[in-house]
Structure formats: structure tokens, C-alpha cells
Image (spheres, rainbow, N blue to C red):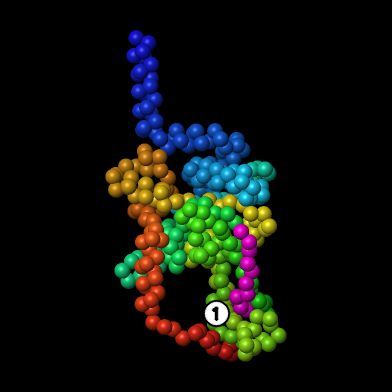
Amino acid sequence: MIKDTIRSILIALVIVILIYPQTVSADSSLTKIPIWLQKHVGLNDGKIAPIILERARDLYQKKKRQGLVNNPCYLAMDATKPSSSINGNPAPRFYVICEKTRSFSTVSSGYGNGRKLKNNNFSNGRQCAKNFSNAEGSKLTAGGSYTTAETRTSFKGFYTQSGHKIPFFRTFLLFDGEGETSNARERAIGGHPAIFLKWKCRFKNKDSPHADDDGYVPYGNLVNYTGGRSNGCTTWSIPDSKKILKIVKEKPTTLYIYPESKDIDAIRKAINKGIPLRNAGLYWNKNCLTAIGSPKFWPKETLQPIINQWRQSLPSQTPLVLPICN
């Protein structure tokens, strides 16, 4: 009698776990998270998905134990979320978490726009990312583990502000990856403000240390693409960039970007089998999954030869020579 009762209880527990794997996993992972941080965990706007926080914390704590990071804060990004909120403003999908000071903040961030080649389309729309890759030249986001490294500030040209020509500099935060993201430097992957200078012409400015051999400097208009697509880098608004760059200055920290290739492959398999992601213990933003149908990861082993072949097929181009400004 007692044995039968115990057997029935065990069977019931197994059934519950099989039917509700994501719920059980989320609850168990939450027990390891500080109480103050638990209120920021969830799938709604402004919150971080349980699986992303769990992996971001694990990465940070691992690197901290190894003595590779000395920052009280760590970073994370959910690249499955949409670019814009219902009101049209850039949607938050990048997280800055400082457990020592009990600080949790969210900001907007861009994902890779990809490319649309003749026989291979791995481009992404403006609202949701479907394609991901770690191939150099793919212009796509690669999820996984990163560590922030040094910054580089470069001159981009001049623009006009309040009637005066002003030099524009942009700071780039380099990322070091591991595993599938180990070629981050080769791909020039990092973080920077979501703004660039669109060149129009050049003008004479011999006194500028950035002038070319003929004494000219480029001139153009600033283009702000906050919350939009990038060339594979993590991009933030100008105010958010200043805050993040200040946090990581001379204090390396970790960045975890979701999804990884294993997540994408598992989700594709679940969709093909008609299994709801919740039942499979998987996560993808619901609105974006509806928009893209199914995500795809293009491994560099497959995509790199395609990109290289495309590059070789391009006609040789003469160096760009900007016209003289009027």
C-alpha cells in the first residue's frame, strides 16, 4: 500500500516535470538569484528572461573566480527581442547588472543586419533578428560569451553644429570572445554608439592633425540609428554609450548575448516537430518568433566560403575620392 502510494507520487512528479519543464527550471534558477534581482526576471518589457540571467551570472562569476574581470557589474543582451516598443520608441534588450549596488538597468541595442546575396539571403529585418552567424563579413550577431577589452577612439570626419564645423570621434569597445565567438576581434565585433558620419565631401584644413597628404578632411552628416540594425556589433544610444563605457573603463567585465547556436538549433527542431517552446523548456521572444517564423544560425564553416566567393566576384573598385565641398 505504502509502496504503491510512493510509486504514484513519483510518477506524478515525473509527469509534472515533463509537462512543465520551463516553469520548473525557471523556479529552480530563481532560487540562486538575489531576492532584489528576482523582481527584474521575466518575459515582459524591461525584464530579463531567466535563462539569460542565469547564463550571464554564471559567466560573470566564472571569470571573476579566474581573476579575469574586476568589475562589480556585468552585461547581457537578448537579441530575440524586437527593436521597437509598441509606442515606437527603441525597446530595451541590453542589460547592465550591478549586484553590489543592487542596480539593474535596461537600454536599447542594435543587432546585425546581415547580407542579402544573390543565392544566399541571411539578412535581418528592422524589427526582429532571424539570422545569426560567427562568420567574418556576415554582419550578423553571434550569441555567446564575451569579455570587454580595451577601447579605441577614432576620427571620422567633420560635421556642422550650431554653424561651426566640429570633428566627430567615435569610441569603440572591443570584445574578446570564446568558443564560437573566439573570432570576435577578427570580425571587429564590439560595442559603440549607434551613430556614424555619412560623408558628403571634403574641405581644406591643413591645421588638422587628421588631414590627408593634400590637407583635406572629410565632411558629412551624422546619422543616428539607435535601436536599429548594426554591422554585427552591439550598439547603444549616445547617452547609454557614455554610461556603459564609463562602467567598463579599465575594468573588464563579461557580456553574455542570447541566443547561442545551440539554442537556435533546438528551437528550429522544436518548431519543425510542432512542439511549443514552453513545453520544450526553450525561450524566444514570442512577438519576434511570430514575425520570423523560425531562426537560423549560419556557422562560419558554412557561411565563410560563401562570403569569400562573393567578395572575389566583386569587380575591382577605384579608391573613393570625395568631391570638394562648396
Which residue is rendered at x = 39% and y = 30% of the image? Answer: 17
Q: Secondary structure at mark 1?
A: strand
Relative to 213, say whether 12 is above or below. Answer: above
Q: Residue furthest top?
A: 1
Relative to 223, say whether 253 is above or below. Answer: above
Figure label count: 1
Magenta portion: prevailing SS class: strand
Quadrant housing residue 113 = bottom left
Dividing the image into 4 quarters, which one contains the C terminus? bottom right
**Front-lying residue, 250 or 165:** 250
Q: Please state the horizontal and vertical placement of residue 237, each as a whole percent of the image.
A: 58, 62
Dividing the image into 4 quarters, which one contains the N terminus? top left
**Front-lying residue, 144 or 108:** 144
**Front-lying residue, 29 or 312:** 312
Q: Residue furthest left?
A: 273
The answer to whether one can see residue 89 in this image is no
Q: Is residue 18 magenta?
A: no
Q: Please state the horizontal and vertical placement of residue 248, each as a whole percent of the image.
A: 65, 56
Q: Residue furthest right?
A: 207
Which residue is rendered at x = 58% and y = 62% of the image? Answer: 174
The residue stretch that appears in magenta: 149-158
Which residue is rendered at x = 62% and y = 85% of the image? Answer: 212
Q: Which residue is mark 1?
A: 199
Relative side of 133 to 325, left or right: left
Q: Please state the horizontal and vertical placement of residue 276, each as a whole percent of the image.
A: 34, 42
Which residue is rendered at x = 35% and y = 65% of the image? Answer: 121
The answer to whether one can see residue 41 in this image is yes
Q: Please state the horizontal and vertical placement of residue 108, each as a whole percent of the image.
A: 54, 57
Residue type for callout 1: Trp
